[in-house]
Image: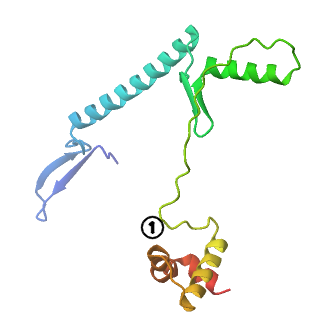
Amino acid sequence: MNDASRVWVYADDGRLICTAEWNANVRSFFPVSVIEQARDRRAAGRINRLQAHLDEVQAERRGQPAIEAQQEIVIPGVISGTREQLAEAAAQARIQRQPIAAKSVPSPTLRLVDVAPTPAPSNVLSLPDTPDARYRYFCTLRDRHQRGEPLGERELDWLLNKYVRTNEYRTLSQR
């Protein structure tokens, strides 16, 4: 009958060459050791992720915050100090706003941090965020260049080489 578990192979002259069994000579595409290594790496990764999650859960249960707070708070150009010093300064400010005759609260020692704003380097080209604004900027630079006004090296490169090769420019210039 029709049995696909084996096939008889005959030569042209009618003699039997062999009987081929279904899946009799099957081999893995990848060697078994590679597959086992991949399974081991995957299992180890899963175990590490579960362990990290377990550590986080146990830390929360013990009452430890997930993110440690910094001891010193720095607001550049404004103030720098510890949480306690800032709390004292806030209390002092509240007291100074209230009309109380006896103000005997000592002033906390805070230091003022002076940070000068750093200007953008001249070799950095700051481009607008939207396509329409970039095209308007391109038109402004193009007009300045045509009038002979000096442009920076980055502006000139963006104007002549970079922006004109973009799909955005091709689309917006056809309007």
Q: How many numbered marks are there?
A: 1
SS category of the residue bearing label 1: loop
What residue is pinned by disc 1? 123
Outermost residue on the front side: it is: 101
Residue at image location 26% in from the left, 43% down from the top: 23
Residue at image location 79% in from the left, 14% down from the top: 103
Above or below, 77 against 51 in this view is below
Q: Answer whether residue 67 is visible to the viewer in this image.
A: no
Nearest to the observer: residue 78 or residue 57 = 78
Nearest to the observer: residue 32 or residue 135 = 135
Asked which quadrant contains residue 127, the reply is: bottom right
Nearest to the observer: residue 72 or residue 130 = 72
Task: Please state the horizontal and vertical placement of residue 14, each as a whole percent of the image.
Answer: 13, 60
Outermost residue on the bottom side: it is: 147
Outermost residue on the right side: it is: 99
Left or right side of 42 for 28 = left
Task: Please state the horizontal and vertical placement of residue 67, each as a whole percent of the image.
Answer: 54, 23
Task: Please state the horizontal and vertical placement of residue 19, each as a whole percent of the image.
Answer: 17, 47
Q: Amino acid at mark 1?
A: Asn
Residue at image location 43% in from the left, 19% down from the top: 51
Categorize mark 1 by other alpha carbons within 10 Å: few (<14), some (14-19), many (20+). few
Nearest to the observer: residue 104 or residue 71 = 104
Classify the position of the C terminus by image quarter.
bottom right
Residue at image location 54% in from the left, 77% down from the top: 167
Q: Answer whether residue 81 is visible to the viewer in this image.
A: yes
Task: Please state the horizontal and vertical placement of residue 55, each as a whole percent of the image.
Answer: 47, 16
Asked which quadrant contains residue 102, the reply is: top right
Left or right side of 109 for 36 = left
Above or below, 83 against 6 in this view is above
